Structure formats: structure tokens, C-alpha cells
Image (cartoon, rainbow, N blue to C red):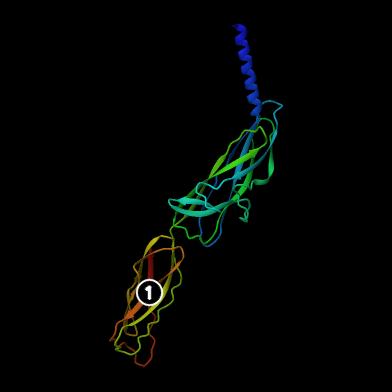
Amino acid sequence: MKNKLIHRLTGTALMLSMNAAQAAISCNISSPGFIFGYDNTLQNIVQTSYSITCTRGVDATDPTTTTYAVRANNGLTPAVNNNQAASGANRLRYDTFTSNTCGTQWRNNPTIPSTAGTITMTGLLPTTVTQTFWGCSNAGLLPTAGIYTDTVTMTPTYSAGVLGGTGTFPVKIITPATCTISAIPSITLAYGNALRLTPATATTSAPVTCSNQLPYTLAVSPTRGVSAGIYYTLSLPGSATGTGAVQNITITATAQAGQAGTCSTSSCIGAAQSHTLTVTY
């Protein structure tokens, strides 16, 4: 019985020794990912990085170097040729790239670095290497306002025998609800003859740009005015829904028939009156 017990302990020691040799170097990969606010007017580019930290075993004969290269996948909700971040059912295209020119997508086959790098360890202290990559999203995508998120998986490749699994990084793209109003052309209301028999009307277009699918209301103040003794009113749609592109909102000026005005000549121009357009969202 004693000999049999000794043989079992010896076998266990050999197995532990073999496992230690296989774990001569262990590595892990991590990245903070990236976050940016989406601007529809330009290409959105943000720089970030991943880090690999490796530790070698305690045996003096353990290797001190390993090669490494890292691939990234298409995220959780990919399109055919792009990654996509999600905000509920809405999607916003973006991609990860190997350079700040946003030319080569970092997914599937391309690796960072493109040629395997080397991690060299000294002693038993952990050694870390860092590689830069970029997140890019094109202008003109007209996303719905919201917070878009995704998770991308990184898969590193090391030298044979090195232990190390995959890692992930978060993506967050914020598209705030916005509305802007460009310069509004004046309205020229030609009333013509005094005491005319029909109302006079004229229009202008207010260029309003609001986030895609964003409801908004419109109001003009004051709604009435007078020029050259001719009274008029202004009207426009009370509400609309943004498309992300410019929407030309029609403002109509109407002067009722039968007004004499104050012109003493056959042709005169009244003083311009100011009105304010307010968009609420």
C-alpha cells in the first residue's frame, strides 16, 4: 500500500510539471473602445488603442518572447460591409480602421499590427504593448437621435504554447437631438391697387434642419404686421418631423382685400417688418 501511494504522488507531480511548462507565457488583451458624438456634416474619426499584457513563468528555461497579431470581428449587429451600432431598432454605420485615414477596415482578415509584432519579457514582471486603431463614421448618414452602442470582439494570435483568450471593447456613438434654422429670405407682398377686390398673398421658405424622426413645432411672432398702411397676417405649419436633411417650411403672408393703405403715390414701398420664427423640439 505504501509503495502504491508513493507512485500516485509521483505521477501527480509529473502532471503538474507538464502543465506549468505549457503555461510558460500567459497574455490578456483589453481596450477602452471609443465614444464620440456624431456630426452629420463631416467624417467622424476617433483614435483609441488595445493593450496586451504578458507574463512568463517562473522556470528559468521558459521563453521570454512571443509574437502577436490581433483581428477584430464585425460587432453584434453588422451590416454587409459595415459594422453597425444599435439604438433600439435604429442602426448607425461605423467601422474600425487600421489608420487615421480610415482606409483599411480592421475586421476579419486584416490584423493590427499587419505583420506580427514581438513581445519581449524581462524577468517575471508583466510586459505590456499597445497598438493604436481608429473608429470612423461617414458624414451624411442622417441618424435618428439616440445613443448607439456595439461590442466588438478582438482575437489575438500568439506563438505556439502561449495562453491567451479573446477580449472585447465597447463602442458608443451619441447623436443628440438638434434643430437649426438657416437664413430666411424676406417676403415681398405686392398689394397693388388700393381697395383691391381679392386678398394678396406671398410666401417664403424657412430652411429648417432637424434630426431624423424628431418631431418639432413651429411658431412665428408676431403673427400680424402692417406696412404702408396695409395689414397682413403670417401663417405656417404648426408641426413637422425631421428627416436629418433640410426641410423648407413655407411661411405665407396674406393681406385681406379692401384696404386703402397710406400710399400717396401710385407706387410705394412700405417699411420692412421683422418677425421671429421659433422651432421647439
Q: Position of residue 169 (x, y in %)?
A: 54, 44
Q: Position of residue 62 (x, y in %)?
A: 69, 28
Q: Which residue is mark 1?
A: 251
Q: Quadrant of the C terminus?
A: bottom left
Q: Is residue 101 above or below residue 56?
A: below
Extreme residue toward the left, this view: 258
Q: Secondary structure at mark 1?
A: strand
Extreme residue toward the top, this view: 1
| Residue occupying image coordinates x 42% and y 74% | 205
Instruction: Kindly identify the amino acid type of the residue bearing the numbered disc 1.
Output: Ile
Q: Position of residue 84 (x, y in %)?
A: 51, 52
Q: Position of residue 7 (x, y in %)?
A: 63, 12
Q: Is residue 102 left or right of residue 210?
A: right
Q: Can residue 31 be spotted in the picture? A: no
Q: Quadrant of the N terminus?
A: top right
Extreme residue toward the front, this view: 80
| Residue occupying image coordinates x 38% and y 91% | 267
Q: Is residue 139 above or below residue 202?
A: above
Q: Can residue 9 be spotted in the picture? A: yes
Q: 10 Å neighbourhood of mark 1: few (<14), some, or many (≥20)?
A: some
| Residue occupying image coordinates x 39% and y 80% | 272
